[in-house]
Amino acid sequence: MSDPVVTLPSPRSAGDLFWDDSRPPPLWFNPSLFLSPVFDSDSFISDHRTFVPFDTLRSELRSHLTSLNSDLLDHINRDYSDFVNLSSKLVDVDATALRMRAPLLELREEINAFRGSVEDARVARASGLDRRCEAEAAREVLESSLEAFRVVSKVEKLIQEQQDGASTRESQSMLLERIASELNRLKFHMVHAQNLLFIENLEKRIQSATVLFDASLRHCFIDGLNNSDASVLYNCLRAYAATDNVKSAEEVFRTTIVAPFIHKVIAHEAYDGTLGDELENDYKQIKHFIAKDCKMLLELSSTGKSGLHVFNFLANSILKEVLSAIQKVKPRVFSPGRPTEFLKNYKASLDFLAYLEGFCPSRSAVTKFRAEAICIEFMKQWNVGVYFSLRFQEIAGGLDSALTSASLILVQDFDSDKRSSPTLVLRQSVTLYESLRSCWKEDVLVFSAADKFLRLALQLLSRYCNWVSSAVNARKGNASVSPGCEWAVSATAEDFVCVIHDVNFLVSEVRGDYVGHISHYLSSCSSEVLDVVRKSMLQGVESLENFLPLLKKTIIEIIVDKSVEELSQLKGIAATCMMSNKPLPVRHSPYVVGLLRPLKAFLEGDKAKHFLTHEIREELLFDTLTELTRRYYELVAERLSEARKTETFLQKSRENAQKRAGVTTGVADQNVSGTEKMCMQLFLDLQEYGRNISALGLNPEDIEPYCSLWKCVAPTDRLNTISV
C-alpha cells in the first residue's frame, strides 16, 4: 500500500501571513450585499474604489472567500456519515410502503360504509319528521274544523238563548259579551282551517249567527244608552272590542244619541233664524248635552286597563256629527268672507275642541284625538289663510289710503291752554296706530297666524317710514314727489312739528305698551320666540326714530330759508357804502330786525309749544341760529370780497388817470374807504343781531359762525372781544 500523497498548501502572500482572521470585517465591507438578487460586481467595485485602496479591497474579498470555503467544508463534514449510510438505510422501502397501504385502504372502506349508513339514517329521520309535521298540521286543521263547528253550534245556542229572553239587561249584555268571545275564537279557527269544503259549508251559518249577534248587540247597546246603564254599556263595549267592531259602536252612538240632539239644536236655530250663523250658542248647548248624556260613556271608554281605549267617541261620534250638521245647515260659517263672524265662530270651534280634549285621560289620548281624520277634516274647513288675506287688505288698505292723501289731516283742534298733547294729531299717524293695534286685537288676531300678523305690523311701520322719508325728500326737491307727499312741497315748519310729535308718540307707545301687549298675548310661547318678536318690533320702531334728525333738519331749513330772504338787503348796503359820500354809519340796518322774526314766530306758535318738548325747542333754536348765522357769514364774506375787489379796481383806475394827466399827490387820501364803511355797517348789524340772539336766551359766543362773522367785520381793536 502506497503512502498517501501529501499536498502542500499554496504559498501565502505577506498580507495573508499577517492577517488576523478573527477580527471583524471593516465597517465599509458588508457581506450581506452579495446575497442581494440585484448585486452587481462592477458597481460594487466602483462604489468602493473611491475611498478603499484596491489591495485592501482584494485582501478583504479573499478573506471572505476563505471564510466561505471553510464554512462549506464544515457543513459537508458534519453530515458526511449520514450521507454515506443513506443507501444502506433505504433498503426495502417499497415493501414497507406496500405493507402500510393495505390497512389504510381497509380503513377507508369502513369509513365510507359508515358514512353511507349515517346519511341513510338522516334521510329516514327527516322523512319521518316531515310526515309527522304534515300529520300534526292535518290534525290541527281537523281540530280547528271540529272546534269551529262546535263554536258555531255554541254561538247559535247562545244566540237562541239570548233571543228567548234573559231576565235582565245586564244578563243579556254579559251573554252577548260571552258570544263575542266565542266569535273571536271562531275567527281564530277559521283562519287555521280556511279553504276547506267543510268550513265553506259553515260560512252561511256563521254569517247568519254574526248578523243575529250584531242586531242583538246593537239593540242591547241602545237600550243601555237610553237607560244610562253603566254595566250594560261596559259589557257591550267589551263585546264590540272583542269582535273588532269598534266603528259600529261609534256609529250606533252617533246616529242614536248624538245625531238627534245635534239636528235639534243646529237645524232648529237655522230654521228660526234667531242667531243666524253663530255657533257659540250651539256649542254651549252641545257641551251641556255632552256633560249630561255622554259623559258616562266617555268615562267608560277611557277607563284604564279596560281595553276600551280603542273607542274614540269624541271624534268619530260627536265631532263627526257636529261637522256634518254644520256643513249641511250652516255652511256659511266656514266662509272667511265675513271676517268678524268667521273669527268668532273659529274661536268658538277651537274652544269646543279644547272642551272635547278635556275628556282625554292623557296627553297621548289628546294626540290621538287630534290625529283622527275627522278632527283634521274639521280644522281644514277653517281657511285661516284667506281670513288673514282679507284682514291684510282691510288693515293695510286703510293705512295706504290715509298715507296717499295729498294733504296733512289734523284730527283735533288745539287748546292754547294745554302744555302738551298726549295723543296723535295727524290722521295718517292715527291710522297707523289703529292699524298696529288692530293686528293684535282679540277680534282680529288668530293665534295660529300670529307670525303673519307680526309681519303685517312690521310692514305697517315700514310703510309709515317710507311716507316720512318721501315727505323729507319731496321738501328737498331731490326727486319726483311720491303720491301722498304733495303736502311736503309747500309744508310749513309747523306741519313737520306735527310729524315729529307723532313720531315720538309712536316710538314711545310701541316700545312700551304695544310690545308689552304682544308679549302678554304670546306668553305661551318660548322665551326665544318672545325675544325674536320683541327685537323685531324694536328694530322696526328704531328705523322710524332715525327719521327724527331729518325732520328737525327740515324744520331748520324752512325757517332759515325764510330768514335769509331778509339778507337780500346786503346788496343795498354795499351799493350805499361804495357809491356815496355818507359818513360812517352809527346804527344798524332795518333788515336785522327781520332776521329772527320767522324763528321767533315758530317758537312762540301753538304747535311748537304744545307738541315740542323743551329739549327739542332748545335744540332747534341753537341749530337754526347756527345755520342762519353760517348763511349770514357766507353772504357777508362774499359781499365784502366783491366790495374790496371793486374798490381796488377803482383805486387803480384813479391812479392810472392821474399818471396820464401828470398829476401827482404827495399826501395819501385821508377819506374813509367804502369798504371800511361797509364793515362798520355790518359790524353794527352784527351787534344788533347778537343782541337779538341774547334775547332768545343764547350766548352769541357759543355760535361758531357768529365768531367767524365777528372776525370778518369787527374793527381791529375789537377782533378778540365779542360784545353786543
Image (cartoon, grey):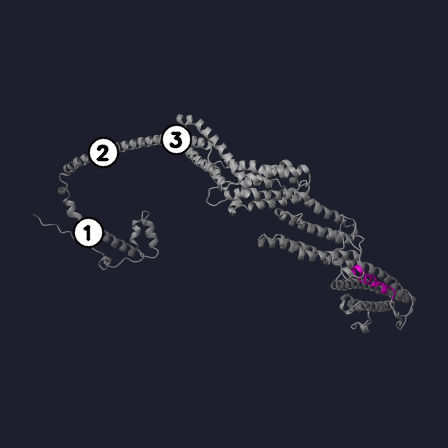
Amino acid type of the residue that numbered disc 2 sits on in the rendered structure: Asn
Relative to residue 197, is residue 365 depicted above or below? below
- Mark 2 residue crowding within 10 angstroms, few (<14) / some (14–19) / many (20+): few
Mark 1 neighbour class, 10 Å CA radius: few under 14, some 14 to 19, many 20 or more: few
Of marks 3 and 2, the one in the foreground: 3
Q: Which residue is mark 3?
A: 150
Instruction: Please provide percent x and percent y for residue 605.
Output: 81, 61
Residue range highlighted in magenta: 589-608
Q: Which mark is residue 402?
A: none
Question: Which sits earlier in the primary sequence, circle 3 or circle 2?
Answer: 2
For image coordinates 65% across by 54% down, the residue present is: 517
Q: Give the residue type at disc 3.
A: Arg
Choose top left, top right, bottom left or bottom right for residue 96. top left
How crowded pointer 3 is (Cα within 10 Å; few <14, some 14-19, many 20+) is rated as few
Question: What is the spatial separation of the Cα atoms under label 3 and label 2, in whole angstroms?
Answer: 56 Å
Q: Nearer the viewer, mark 1 or mark 2?
A: 2
Judged by its main secondary structure, the magenta piece is: helix
Q: Which residue is mark 1?
A: 74
